[in-house]
């Protein structure tokens, strides 16, 4: 009799433990977690079919605001993706490269070097580290990253994110706009925006900027100790493993007095990169020569707007195809249809952003600000509504059919 009682209690305990595990998994997978455009972008990368991306760009917000994969696909025929998170620190660059090679192995990887520009006093914030660590598979690369960059007493929170985000209920209902978009992403299996995010604004600086003087400026300034260590670690790994299909870039920025030392650190980073035999392309230094206009192509000091994005995407596409001879992958009919859908949404983003920029200029609003457009339900609904109201601006077959 007692044996039967113990068995019953044991079964109940096991059932309870399984229920706790299942509930914890569901909560930290869908509700009690950080969720924003970075989450969406990273999750969508792992939904892309293996071997379907010709190029992947690694970096921070400069990358996902400055490059449009749908535009590149429509105009140049190759597939690509911005594997990038906000304020991405130097410690994640090598793990990012390893992840990209493991899950896609593209013909070319472009690394935007913003992560290596931080001073020693600008230590990576936990939030920036988590934008990578919380949103990638818990594989060997992830475990190596934790061992290198995260204190041992903090690692449990990475294995069980719910420990960190258990009180994030108070972020609702705001987070529902991302939660609903994330559920749609998981159902469709691909990102509508392919990671792109922008702010509809044309920024006009009111202080002296130095962009017109930078082409002849090869002065340097030492990198932060951690930044240089991680940069050299990355370059040594690439060289030791004979990984050649990587090019390093500095995307265009508006350089003012406060950012001049960062520009000089960029020159120093370029010298280090080239000493290892890798190409470095500095569009911060030569941006004006390549046609980037300070008062037209940015939405703030460090990010390109929709117009600058197309210029940069054109530049990168030309570089990939004509300098590095990159060819396009063969896509299935269903993959082509998905990319055509993303192109459709990019047209909506472009036309909506163009309208919002025009309105702000008419009102004299050319400082910091503007309307953000990210892959979340509110933005999607807004640009879809605009497209229905302005069908003359482009083809919106997918959306108009749903009206």
Image: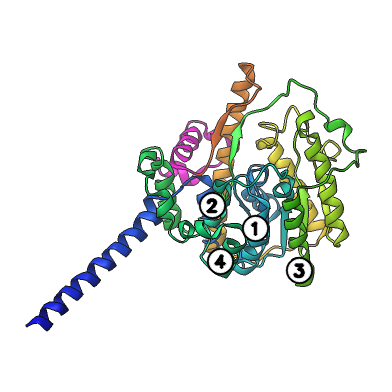
Where is mark 1, residue-wise? 79
Up-down relation of residue 29 to residue 255 (above or below): below
Q: Earlier in the sequence, mark 2 or mark 3?
A: 2
Spatial separation of the CA atoms under disc 4 and disc 2: 13 Å
Q: Earlier in the sequence, mark 4 or mark 2?
A: 2
Please report the residue visible at 38 percent of the width from the left and 53 percent of the height from the top.
30
Picture coordinates of residue 35 (x, y %)? 46, 47
Up-down relation of residue 231 to residue 219 (above or below): below
Labels 1, 2: front one: 2
Picture coordinates of residue 196 (x, y %)? 59, 45
Q: Quadrant of residue 370?
A: top right
- Local packing at callout 1 (Cα closer than 10 Å; few below 14, some 14-19, many 20+) is many
Where is mark 3, residue-wise? 243
- Local packing at callout 2 (Cα closer than 10 Å; few below 14, some 14-19, many 20+) is some
| Residue 143, numbered label | 4
Up-down relation of residue 47 to residue 375 (above or below): below
């Amino acid at each position: 009799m007692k044996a039967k009682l113990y068995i019953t209690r044991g079964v109940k305990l096991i059932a309870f433990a399984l229920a706790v595990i299942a509930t914890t998994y569901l909560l930290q997978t869908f509700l009690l977690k950080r969720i924003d455009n970075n989450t969406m972008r990273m999750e969508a990368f792992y939904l892309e079919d293996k071997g379907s991306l010709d190029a992947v760009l690694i970096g921070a917000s400069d990358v996902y605001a400055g490059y449009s994969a749908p535009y590149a696909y429509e105009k140049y025929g190759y597939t690509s993706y911005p594997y990038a998170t906000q304020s991405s620190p130097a410690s994640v660059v090598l793990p990012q490269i390893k992840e990209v090679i493991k899950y896609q192995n593209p013909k070319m990887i472009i690394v935007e070097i913003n992560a290596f520009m931080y001073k020693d006093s600008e230590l990576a914030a936990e939030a920036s580290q988590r934008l990578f660590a919380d949103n990638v598979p818990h594989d060997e690369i992830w475990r190596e990253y934790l061992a290198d960059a995260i204190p041992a007493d903090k690692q449990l929170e990475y294995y069980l994110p719910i420990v960190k985000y258990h009180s994030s209920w108070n972020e609702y209902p705001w987070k529902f706009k991302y939660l609903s978009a994330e559920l749609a992403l998981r159902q469709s299996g691909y990102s509508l925006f392919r990671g792109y995010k922008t702010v509809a604004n044309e920024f006009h600086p009111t202080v002296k900027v130095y962009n017109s003087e930078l082409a002849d400026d090869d002065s340097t300034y030492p990198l932060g100790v951690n930044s240089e260590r991680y940069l050299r670690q990355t370059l040594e790994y690439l060289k030791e493993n004979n990984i050649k299909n990587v090019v390093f870039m500095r995307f265009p920025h508006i350089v003012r007095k406060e950012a001049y030392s960062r520009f000089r650190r960029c020159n120093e980073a370029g010298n280090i990169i080239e000493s290892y035999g890798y190409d470095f392309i500095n569009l911060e230094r030569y941006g004006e020569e390549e046609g980037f206009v300070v008062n037209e192509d940015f939405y703030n000091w460090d990010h390109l707007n929709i117009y600058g994005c197309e210029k940069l995407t054109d530049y990168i596409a030309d570089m990939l195809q004509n300098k590095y001879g990159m060819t396009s992958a063969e896509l299935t009919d269903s993959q082509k249809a998905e990319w055509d859908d993303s192109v459709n949404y990019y047209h909506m983003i472009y036309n909506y952003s163009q309208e919002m920029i025009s309105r702000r200029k008419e009102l004299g609003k050319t400082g910091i600000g503007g309307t953000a457009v990210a892959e979340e339900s509110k933005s999607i609904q807004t640009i879809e509504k605009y497209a229905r109201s302005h069908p003359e601006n482009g083809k919106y077959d997918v959306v108009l059919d749903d009206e």
